């Protein structure tokens, strides 16, 4: 038996809106893998979640059986231990009011823990899945690319500008959700196509507005339906070329399929009823987005969320730096959207990171803390977009309600609070929303906000680049030496009141000093 | 052109096939005991035909709305034509027996007594009757129609009409079942061996069996019951239980045929017809022995080898080194086994090796027809006991093997094998085995895909091909196949395999359409295919269109062929032949010209709606160039046979392909080629002796690094 081979193999189970799936992958080459096996059992959780927001007992038990079966295949056929298997759930479970009971039931019955993916994690995994294929595009670093996946309950988009993620959004527009909200029995009514286009138009307009289409824009699509249209479902190459699909073909297929009976679609296209149910509506959404963006064709990816999960399992560590860059890129794009003074914001982010890295010698920070602090720094003045009065509160609201690639809902919330407390009052007992946060979160916010407050005082010279700082701790004082000719007295006057929070959190007073090196520079 | 001109009726085509088999029994160039065996095959074939096909036609005649078959015939019309054709076939069978085979056997010193016993014969049978027959024979008197005893389908009976009183009183029927340990008894003779049918002995001793009664007449007869009974699996909680019910119901299913000695009086016939509730037109007169399958014992008589085919022992496959690791060999290249010319052992050995190999994680297999002592099933038991994940899809619906398969399924389950009883509403007919092995490079799947069953007995008499491969795509598809048919996953798109009833027909249609397109553009195009039966109208239509466009189509169809070849404007470029020889042609191999880069497939499926719509079947593309060449050679050989092949004519008749005496007999040719290849391979391979060393000495050497 070869233990190396064992460690190079991972399995995943995905509880989706229309089916429960499993996959096993084996490490192959550099950041690639070979998909050894895939399993798929259609279970209509989306039908439950998108209509009644409640997963029925019957479907819960069907999921339990499917997960048990998959677990047995993964262990019996591939020798995978539970620690090598990651189980995730997407929008159907996320939106179900009884998701906790559902997750507990799966855990009790199978011994496996379900991780409910939030929207940001879905975006991150989508990025992992599709990036190898995007990089094969010769103009990847020169063009703008919109990655779209229409799922059962939601539509995820990811916008790349010159290779950088600048936006990621999730919309509550899904093929299955649309079918159930409109009523699947009316799909064959005359004029239904017009009704459906009306239904999707609002979200499509939001997408167009959110990405500020810039030419040239290419549209890359993920999802079983376009894959089926291109006959790509049997492929598992993670870095295969994208398949062009003219928008007319998508629209024609949608127009043909929407009015058809699900049974007839299944028979003619050789697919299950669950697949057939979403085929027409899904293609209609893809077509509507492409038409609104005026892209003549879409490029169909053979990748899926499963590829992202498997890549994350096999190569997740390799991607930490890449994700940090992409998250900051996404926050920068957001800052630009809110007309933030980016030069200032970037300097503040630079100082904040420098302080955090120095403080790391005595206080523990995670890699994620640095990303959250950077995002908060870049966006700390976003609230000015709304109003200069009490703008830190607007900043909090704007960040909390934005999609930042790479940050989950929880991390985004933390970034919003960190930015909110960069000025004025520090957290107080009267701030009910803050006080209601778990202790861990309150501590993290305080630690990062205290740093951001100091960093925001250090922008001595708005016309120059960031100055070099050096740090030392002496007699309960954090000495920050700045290599600048600018007078520090004004900055120190800002630091004194704002630094109180730093002192409360770290027990250190903050003192700004001129770096002697500046004299000779 | 309307339906009757486009298609032959499948039942009549099958009867023509059986007629061709019967011609082997007539053929003086075939060794005598083999000719007897061919006769018995036609008899057992016909029994099965009645049980399944005629039984099915009977049910269809009772349907509210009868459907016409592709040839345009209603079920009742088909039945009528079948009856007429069967009557001629039966007549030919008995003519063959009495006019050809029995005289020839007699010349060879084997006598079959066909008349009544003379006094000396009766005396000689006295002991046999007293000790073996009398204790087991139970005459059953039939006193009223509603108490008619249950007659076993396929068993020969003796019907005796017995007088019950003074003249004019109605006669009584007495039935004697003739099935026992022996159907024929050897009669000691000085100069030769003679065999007497049991019924002849029984008739000689009727006075003892029915003492004091006046036997007006005694006639042999046999009934056949419908075996095409619905399983009702949609509602069955337990398929094995449902299958047991079907097996029970078969015993009382309606009679679809009665064979009776032609000497039977109208009175006796009437009594039986009424009692069995059988239509008079389903009664077939036979001029002699009921149940010709019983003659099979003659072909198994010891000695007499000069009256049999010369031995053609299966050769070791030239692509397999029996001394080397089977996994390494398969990983190195695809291996094609060509049965029965090559031995089936590599498959058995592979599964046996897998069962004890610690690197093997899982074994999955489809079992359709296995022997009752199957070494493969034994290996599966061993693998399960060794803690491997073993899955066996045991098809309980394999007709007439249901009982054996239920027993196997139960024993495998008891050993810890995960057993699946096939798929609801579908028969799992694919021949596939997958072995999952953990190796240094990760998971490797070894797959065996074949045209024949995992049955070491038929592997000696059926021509089949099997592919052993470690091709990753094939392994991935095999895994997906097993996950789908065991219910772990919905069917997912395959990378290279095609599966019925999902897309196998569509794949074939695409291939045919491609050739059609090439021909339409004036490019070379051909299709060569070998199969057991060709029935599917959609595929036939596609072949017609291909022919019209100029595709040259050569088909080797052993059995049913509904395609009408050689018809101007329809099929003039289609040629159909079929080989009937010592081995049962069973391999399904299809090849398409594909613009000069032939695409070759093997398959478990015939081109029949049954296989393409109601069975789980696989179509396997052959990617290895050497294997492709082997299969193309196989097709060429089969299609080039000029000694044992029959050509289908446009009018539906079959004619032997006559040669000038120097014709090619494909099975012989393939056997000789196999022998030659193996011999050449042996000569080329250097002999290397591999001594068995004590394990501890080997370890000591390794640890010290110095020779001892």
Image: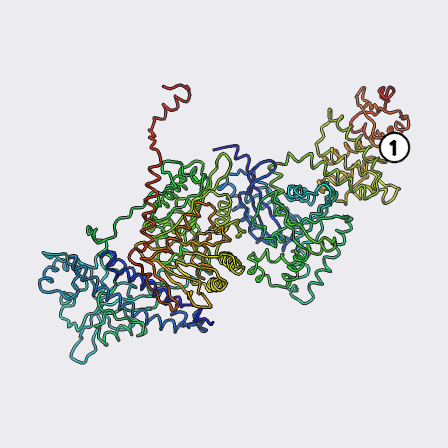
Q: Can residue B36 be seen in this view?
A: no
Q: Position of residue B292 (x, y in %)?
A: 25, 62
Q: Is residue B116 visible?
A: yes
Q: Which of B388 and A197 is in front in this view?
A: A197
Q: Is residue A77 left or right of residue A467?
A: left
Q: In this view, does A214 lie above or below B175?
A: above
Q: Residue at x 28, y 48 (%)?
A: B312
Q: Position of residue A88 (x, y in %)?
A: 61, 44
Q: Which chain carries label 1?
A: A
Q: Residue at x 76, y 51 (%)?
A: A208
Where, quadrant-wise, is the C terminus of chain A in this rendering? top right
Q: Which of B611 and B105 is in front in this view?
A: B105
Secondary structure found at label 1: loop
* Residue annotated with mark 1: A462
Q: In this view, does A21 lie above or below B24?
A: above
When asked about the image quadrant of residue A434, the answer is top right
Q: In this view, does A75 lie to the left or right of B167?
A: right
């Amino acid at each position: 038996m070869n233990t190396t081979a064992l460690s190079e193999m991972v399995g995943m189970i995905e509880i989706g809106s229309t089916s429960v799936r499993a996959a096993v992958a084996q490490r192959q080459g550099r950041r690639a893998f070979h998909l050894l096996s895939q399993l798929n059992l259609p279970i209509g959780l989306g039908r439950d979640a998108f209509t009644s927001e409640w997963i029925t007992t019957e479907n819960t038990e069907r999921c339990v059986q499917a997960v048990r079966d998959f677990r047995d295949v993964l262990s019996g056929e591939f020798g995978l231990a539970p620690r090598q298997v990651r189980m995730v759930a997407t929008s159907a479970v996320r939106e179900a009011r009884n998701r906790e009971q559902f997750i507990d039931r799966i855990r009790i019955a199978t011994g496996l823990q379900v991780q409910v993916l939030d929207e940001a994690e879905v975006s991150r995994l989508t990025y992992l899945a599709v990036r190898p294929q995007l990089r094969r595009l010769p103009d990847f670093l020169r063009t703008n690319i919109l990655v779209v996946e229409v799922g059962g309950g939601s539509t995820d988009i990811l916008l790349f500008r010159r290779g950088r993620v600048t936006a990621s959004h999730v919309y509550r527009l899904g093929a299955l959700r649309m079918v159930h909200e409109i009523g699947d029995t009316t799909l064959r009514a005359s004029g239904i196509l017009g009704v459906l286009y009306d239904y999707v138009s609002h979200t499509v307009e939001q997408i167009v507005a959110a990405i500020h289409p810039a030419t040239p824009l290419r549209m890359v699509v993920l999802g079983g339906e376009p894959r089926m249209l291109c006959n790509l479902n049997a492929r598992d190459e993670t870095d295969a070329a994208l398949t062009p699909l003219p928008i007319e073909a998508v629209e024609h297929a949608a127009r043909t399929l929407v009015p058809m009976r699900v049974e007839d679609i299944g028979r003619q296209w050789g697919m299950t009823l669950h697949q057939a149910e979403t085929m027409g509506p899904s293609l209609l959404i893809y077509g509507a987005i492409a038409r609104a963006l005026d892209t003549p064709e879409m490029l169909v990816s053979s990748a899926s969320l499963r590829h992202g999960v498997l890549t994350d399992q096999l190569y997740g560590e390799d991607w930490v730096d890449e994700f940090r860059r992409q998250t900051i890129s996404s926050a920068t794009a957001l800052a630009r959207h809110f007309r933030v003074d980016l030069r200032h914001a970037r300097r503040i982010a630079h100082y904040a990171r420098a302080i955090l890295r120095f403080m790391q010698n005595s206080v523990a920070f995670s890699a994620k803390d640095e990303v959250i602090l950077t995002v908060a720094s870049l966006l700390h003045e976003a609230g000015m977009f709304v109003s200069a009065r009490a703008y830190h509160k607007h900043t909090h609201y704007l960040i909390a309600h934005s999609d930042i690639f790479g940050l989950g809902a929880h991390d985004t919330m933390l970034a919003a609070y960190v930015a909110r407390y960069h000025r004025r009052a520090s957290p107080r007992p009267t701030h009910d929303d803050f006080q209601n946060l778990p202790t861990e979160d309150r501590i993290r916010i305080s630690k990062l906000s205290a740093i951001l407050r100091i960093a925001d005082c250090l922008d001595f010279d708005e016309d120059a680049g960031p100055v070099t700082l050096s740090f030392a701790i002496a007699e309960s004082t954090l000495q920050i030496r700045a290599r600048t000719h600018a007078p520090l007295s004004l900055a120190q006057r800002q630091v004194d009141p704002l630094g109180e929070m730093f002192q409360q959190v770290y027990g250190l007073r903050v003192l700004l000093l001129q770096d002697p090196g500046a004299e000779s520079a | 052109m309307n339906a009757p001109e486009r298609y032959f009726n499948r039942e009549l085509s099958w009867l023509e096939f059986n007629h061709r088999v019967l011609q082997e029994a007539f053929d003086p160039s075939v060794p005598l005991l083999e000719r007897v065996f061919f006769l018995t095959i036609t008899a057992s074939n016909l029994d099965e035909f009645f049980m399944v096909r005629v039984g099915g036609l009977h049910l269809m005649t009772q349907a509210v709305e009868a459907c016409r078959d592709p040839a345009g015939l209603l079920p009742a019309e088909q039945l009528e034509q079948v009856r007429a054709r069967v009557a001629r076939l039966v007549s030919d069978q008995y003519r063959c027996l009495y006019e050809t085979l029995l005289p020839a056997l007699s010349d060879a010193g084997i006598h079959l007594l066909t008349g009544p016993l003379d006094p000396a014969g009766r005396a000689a049978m006295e002991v046999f009757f007293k000790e073996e027959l009398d204790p087991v024979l139970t005459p059953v008197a039939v006193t009223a129609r509603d108490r008619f005893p249950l007659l076993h389908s396929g068993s020969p009976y003796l019907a005796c009409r017995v007088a019950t009183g003074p003249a004019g009183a109605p006669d009584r029927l007495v039935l004697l079942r003739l099935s026992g340990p022996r159907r024929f008894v050897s009669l000691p003779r000085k100069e030769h061996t003679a065999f007497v049918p049991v019924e002849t002995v029984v008739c000689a001793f009727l006075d003892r069996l029915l003492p004091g009664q006046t036997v007006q007449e005694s006639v042999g007869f046999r009934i056949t019951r419908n075996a095409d009974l619905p399983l009702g699996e949609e509602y069955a909680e337990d398929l094995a239980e449902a299958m047991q019910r079907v097996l029970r119901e078969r015993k009382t299913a309606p009679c679809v045929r009665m064979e009776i000695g032609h000497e039977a009086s109208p009175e006796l016939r009437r009594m039986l017809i009424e009692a069995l509730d059988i239509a008079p037109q389903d009664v077939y007169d036979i001029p002699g022995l009921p149940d010709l399958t019983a003659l099979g014992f003659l072909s198994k008589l010891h000695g007499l080898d000069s009256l049999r085919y010369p031995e053609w022992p299966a050769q070791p496959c030239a692509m397999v080194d029996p001394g080397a690791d089977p996994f390494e060999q398969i990983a190195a290249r695809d291996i094609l086994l060509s049965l029965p010319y090559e031995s089936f052992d590599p498959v058995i050995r592979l599964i046996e090796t897998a069962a004890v190999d610690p690197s093997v994680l899982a074994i999955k297999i489809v079992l359709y027809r296995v022997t009752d002592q199957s070494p493969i099933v034994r290996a599966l038991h061993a693998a399960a006991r060794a803690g491997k994940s073993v899955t066996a899809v045991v098809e309980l619906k394999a007709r007439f093997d249901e009982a054996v398969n239920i027993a196997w399924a139960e024993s495998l389950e008891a050993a810890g094998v995960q057993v699946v009883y096939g798929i609801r509403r579908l028969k799992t007919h694919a021949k596939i085995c997958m072995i999952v092995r953990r190796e240094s490079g990760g998971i490797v799947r070894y797959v065996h895909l074949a045209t024949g069953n995992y049955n070491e007995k038929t592997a000696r008499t059926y021509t089949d091909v099997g592919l052993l491969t470690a091709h990753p795509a094939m392994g991935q598809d095999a895994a997906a196949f097993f996950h789908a048919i065991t219910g772990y996953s919905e069917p997912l798109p395959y990378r290279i395999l095609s599966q019925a009833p999902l897309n196998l027909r569509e794949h074939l249609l695409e291939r045919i359409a491609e050739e059609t397109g090439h021909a339409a553009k004036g490019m070379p195009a051909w299709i060569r295919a070998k199969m057991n039966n060709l029935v599917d109208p959609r595929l036939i239509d596609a072949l017609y269109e291909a022919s019209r466009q100029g595709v040259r189509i050569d088909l080797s169809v052993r059995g049913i062929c509904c395609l009408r070849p050689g018809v101007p404007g329809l099929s003039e470029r289609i040629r159909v032949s079929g080989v009937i020889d010592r081995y049962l042609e069973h391999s399904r191999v299809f090849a398409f010209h594909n613009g000069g880069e032939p695409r070759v497939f093997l398959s478990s499926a015939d081109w029949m709606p049954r296989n393409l719509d109601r069975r789980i079947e696989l179509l396997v593309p052959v990617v290895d160039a050497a294997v492709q060449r082997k299969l193309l050679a196989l097709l060429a050989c089969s299609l080039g046979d000029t000694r044992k092949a029959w050509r289908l004519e446009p009018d539906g008749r079959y004619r032997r392909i006559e040669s000038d005496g120097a014709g090619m007999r494909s099975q012989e040719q393939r056997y000789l080629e196999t022998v030659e290849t193996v011999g050449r391979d042996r000569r080329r391979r250097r002999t290397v002796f591999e001594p068995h060393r004590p394990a501890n000495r080997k370890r000591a050497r390794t640890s010290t690094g110095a020779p001892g």
